[in-house]
Amino acid sequence: MSEQSRKSAEEAAAAKDRVVVYPKANELFIDIDDSVSLAVFDAHIKILDGALGGGLLCKKRPSPSGAQGRWHITVTLPRPVKDAFERILLQCLLGSDRLHEALSWVAASNPENVQHATPTVFFEKPTALPAYEP
């Protein structure tokens, strides 16, 4: 990620009293906004786990918005994600906020966009809540 991309993300997060969290090479960030999306996650994570030979780790925590039924889920894969497009695809298949993923795809597709290299981030509270298993 370029220095300008990091600065833009950090400025946007700071405006919301949040910090930017970037995914590790083998992580997916799933942004769940409702019970339907959570049901999609619960059903599809089993498919993805089987396709990758098992071993997925999932950490689910309340979204920093505090709104009921909203979650941030970090999925750790047994291998690195190939690129931003695979990350976006897998996150979408797992029920992540489709508008957010569509905007991430647009950002990843436009080399002039400052979010081109790493369009997927979480904005979290500076004092992160402890993660727990789903």
Image: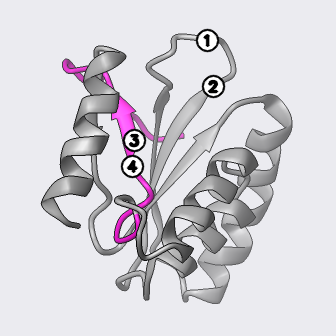
In depth, the one of 49 and 90 nearer the eye is 90
Disc 2 + disc 3, Cβ < 8 Å: no
Q: CA distance from mark 1 to mark 3?
A: 16 Å
Q: CA distance from mark 2 to mark 3?
A: 13 Å
Left or right of 61 in this view: 45: right
Location of the N terminus by quadrant is: bottom left
Residue at left offset 73%, top offset 75%: 47
Q: Residue 23: percent from the left, percent from the top?
A: 32, 59
Q: Which residues are magenta?
A: 116-134
In the depicted structure, whether residue 97 falls above or below residue 68: below
Element type where label 1 sits in the image: loop
Residue type beneath disc 2: Arg
Residue 67 magenta-drawn? no
Q: CA distance from mark 4 to mark 3?
A: 4 Å
Q: Determine crowd level at label 1: few under 14, some 14-19, many 20+ residues with C-alpha closer than 10 A.
A: few
Q: Earlier in the sequence, mark 2 or mark 3?
A: 2
Q: Which mark is residue 122?
A: 3
Element type where label 2 sits in the image: loop
Left or right of 95 in this view: 23: left
Residue type beneath disc 1: Ala
Instruction: Tell me the residue that label 2 is attached to.
Output: 70
